[in-house]
Amino acid sequence: MFKKQLTPEQALQRLKQYCAYQERCHAEVVDKLYQLGVWKKEHDAIIATLIEENYLNEERFALAYAGGKYRMKQWGRVKIKYELKQKQVSNYSINKALKQFDEEEYRQTLQKLANDKYALLKGEQYLVRKKKTMDYLIQRGYETDLITAAVNDIIKK
């Protein structure tokens, strides 16, 4: 059973709604084109139209994605950069998105996460507690040098 073939105009309308709902990266739009059953030769024209009409903007996507993951999930720069690379976002857009974070606020967020995790592991031995806290922060995508400084700061207190 085959899906009904959409005309390029129908696909464009669908994708306008898709992009208007939330910011999308180019790779997500290409995947959606395949899902809609649009011929590959028509992809470039549709994507070009979406960009011209400002439905699709990679830089805007990167800023929104990075800001959201940092604010809502408290991810670090390393994880955000990795995820944006997975979505085939350009290095220029990634770097611009990562520059939006206030350095002082970023370090405070890291310190709060470190304090919370360290306090949670109260029953553990000193070295186990330190390692688990550091592993947790690495998994969250924070830079190793900042993690080391934050954990050492907790231990000094």
Image: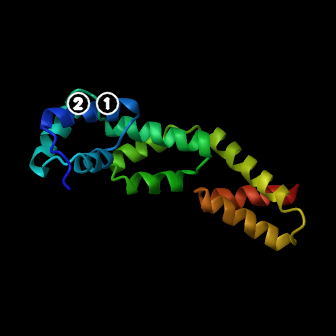
Number of marks in picture? 2
Residue located farthest toward the top when viewing the structure as drawn: 53
> Where in the figure is residue 53, as x and y percent of width and height?
23, 26
Amino acid type, label 1: Gln
Q: Position of residue 85 (x, y in %)?
A: 39, 55
Q: Who is closer to the viewer here, 119 or 104?
A: 119
Q: Residue furthest front?
A: 1
- Kind of residue indicated by mark 2: Gln
Task: Indicate which disc residue 17 carries.
Answer: 1
Q: Write down the residue under mark 2.
A: 13
Q: Quadrant of residue 142?
A: bottom right
Q: Nearer the viewer, residue 8 or 4?
A: 4
**Left or right: 123 with respect to 66?**
right
User: Quick check: marks 2 and 1 in contact, CB under 8 Å?
Assistant: yes
In the rendered structure, the answer to whether residue 80 lies left or right of residue 110 reads: left
Indicate the position of residue 101 as horizontal and vertical percent values: 55, 39
Residue 155 image point, x, y percent: 84, 60
Q: Secondary structure at mark 1?
A: helix
Mark seen at residue 1: none
- The Cα–Cα distance between marks 2 and 1, rounded to whole angstroms, is 7 Å
Q: Name the one closer to the observer, 66 or 108.
A: 66
